[in-house]
Image (cartoon, grey):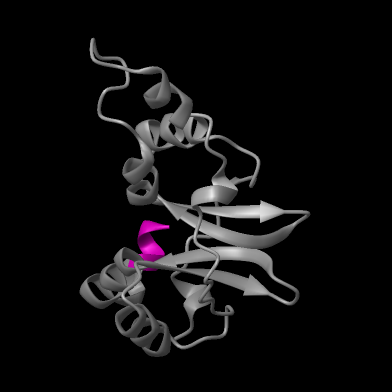
Amino acid sequence: MHVANIMTKKVHTVAPEDCLSTLNDIFLNVTYRHLLVEKHGRLVGVISDRDTLKHLSPFIGQQLERKEDRNQLNLKVSDIMSTRLITVDPETLIDSASILLLENNISCLPVIKGDMKIDGILSWKDILQYHVYGEDKLQALS
């Protein structure tokens, strides 16, 4: 079976110019953990909720908040996103994608077509659901 059968097709993207505060707001309101960074219709990076948390001060909104804590919220996505992109195309076999996730110690794979155009995203959770529920049950859930 191919990645296209189990990937998430509706992808939330952000721009390299977006700020850390925007990322924080997004991740506070969604259940997924990765955003793809897109510029001119092309994938240029990946950012996770963990990347965002690494750069947020725990003092934001607290009595001990300093000016530099607040200034961190102005960091740009381009400053903290991962640009070491490991991608797959829709025709990649699920087993091959699983190996890429494991061998590279990553938790998602952008699915691209052609010249880095985003087609979807595949996470370890998508693969686990496929293995646990099988193809028939996944189609029933969609």
**Residue 12 seen anywhere in this rendered image of the structure:** no
Kindly indicate the quadrant of the structure image that contains residue 107: bottom left
Residue 59 in the image: x percent, y percent?
26, 23
Q: Is residue 112 above or below residue 93?
A: above
Kindly indicate the quadrant of the structure image that contains residue 56: top left
Which residue is at 37% across, 41% downward?
55
Residue 125 in the image: x percent, y percent?
30, 64
Q: Is residue 88 above or below residue 141?
A: below
Kindly indicate the quadrant of the structure image that contains residue 24: top left
Bounds of the magenta segment: 138-142
Q: Is residue 16 above or below residue 110?
A: above
Q: Nearer the viewer, residue 35 or 5?
A: 35
Q: Nearer the viewer, residue 72 or 40?
A: 72
Residue furthest to the top: 63
Q: Quadrant of the C terminus?
A: bottom left
Q: Nearer the viewer, residue 134 or 128?
A: 128
- Number of labels in the image equals 0
Residue 52 in the image: x percent, y percent?
39, 43
